[in-house]
Amino acid sequence: MDISVLPLAAGQMKAKVADESQLGFGRIFTDRMLLVEWTAEQGWHNARIKPYEPFVLDPSAQVFHYAQEIFEGLKAYKWADGRVALFRPEKNARRFNLSADRLCMPELPEELFVEGIKQLVGLEQDWIPTAAGTSLYIRPAMIGVQPVLGVNPSDHYYFFVILSPVGAYYAAGFKPVSIMVEDHYVRAVPGGTGEAKTGGNYASSLKAGLEAKKKGFDQVLWLDGREQRYIEEVGAMNMFFVYGNRIVTSALNGSILSGVTRDSVLALGKKLGCTVEETKIDVNELMADIKAGKVTEAFGSGTAAVITPVGKLYYKGETVQLGGGGVGELTQKLYDTLTGIQTGALPDEFGWVTFVK
Ligand code: COI
């Protein structure tokens, strides 16, 4: 599908942040966005790259009431030789369609997803920050915009992509975060939408997140929705526990997000000579293993969070320390290897990188 590029008036161009250490996460947006529409009659049509601006939507639009929304997150990096790299965008395209299917939204051709992003990022490449730990965060999303209050799938959708120059997801940067194991609220249940990347999963996580923050923790670690016994994920990250040379993460079970970074960590872990294990992790056994000193490191993985060391875990009145409260050796190695591949400092032996022309 041809994507038209609408002109950008001088007044629609924003100033870039001069100090890249002040970027934070997802607060600044570039000058342009991608928008494609879908209707039952026309399918996907009217693909255009246009100035970044607010939508005008009917107050009855489906997304405002019944939350028919899905999204993705990936990043673009400017390499030292000037090339612009994307990391495994086809994985995001595939997952986007799995989420679309779960939310009864139309399938988006993977090529349109990837090509649309490439064209948009190509036009906006001056916005890609280059300081260590920074990148251009890409946020594709789809919303149902039909103006009707009946509870049905929408007959009109917007697929759009916005771009945000970002630094670290957690304000402290690459430092250990403290995590509270949530034993009251649940994020997902078997048969629910946990595996889909849909806004509702995040809306329903806010209350637990706020309560955890009040107690001094950065985020919550979700347990399974049936027994509240098995480790699932941290909302913005998949979780990994390191037992010496063994890396353990929760097996995908239909309610855990199948992270692109998670998948990359499993491959990199093997490459670095570790045993990797995807299994059910019982929180009580995990706490006992941590107390017995068997768990040498813990970290989370995600596109936004990259690899984030976990320094403390709280569960049922007890706080345990991980990795001596600092950044573990393997966590650091995985972070350096992953970001090295993404930024071109290390060879891409897995063929994960694709370039924007
Ligand atoms: C990402 O890692 O890209 C995510 O989608 C997590 C997020 C909600 C910021």
Image (cartoon, rainbow, N blue to C red):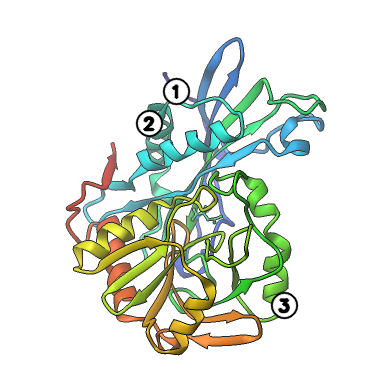
- Which residue does the numbered mark 2 point to in the structure image? 115
Horizontal and vertical percent position of residue 20: 45, 65
The local secondary structure at tag 3 comes to helix
Which quarter shows the N terminus?
A: top left
- Which residue does the numbered mark 3 point to in the structure image? 214
Disc 2 residue type (three-letter): Glu
Please identify, in this view, whether the residue under mark 3 or under mark 2 is nearer the observer. 3
Please identify, in this view, whether the residue under mark 2 or under mark 1 is nearer the observer. 2
Indicate whether 285 appears above or below 206: below
Residues at marks 1 and 3, CA–CA distance in whole angstroms: 46 Å
Which comes sooner in the sequence, label 3 or label 2? 2
For the point 53% across and 17% down, the residue is 45
Which comes sooner in the sequence, label 2 or label 1? 1
Q: Residues within 10 Å of mark 1 (few under 14, many from 20)?
A: some
Quadrant in the rendering for residue 69? top right
Disc 3 residue type (three-letter): Lys
For the point 39% across and 51% down, the residue is 260
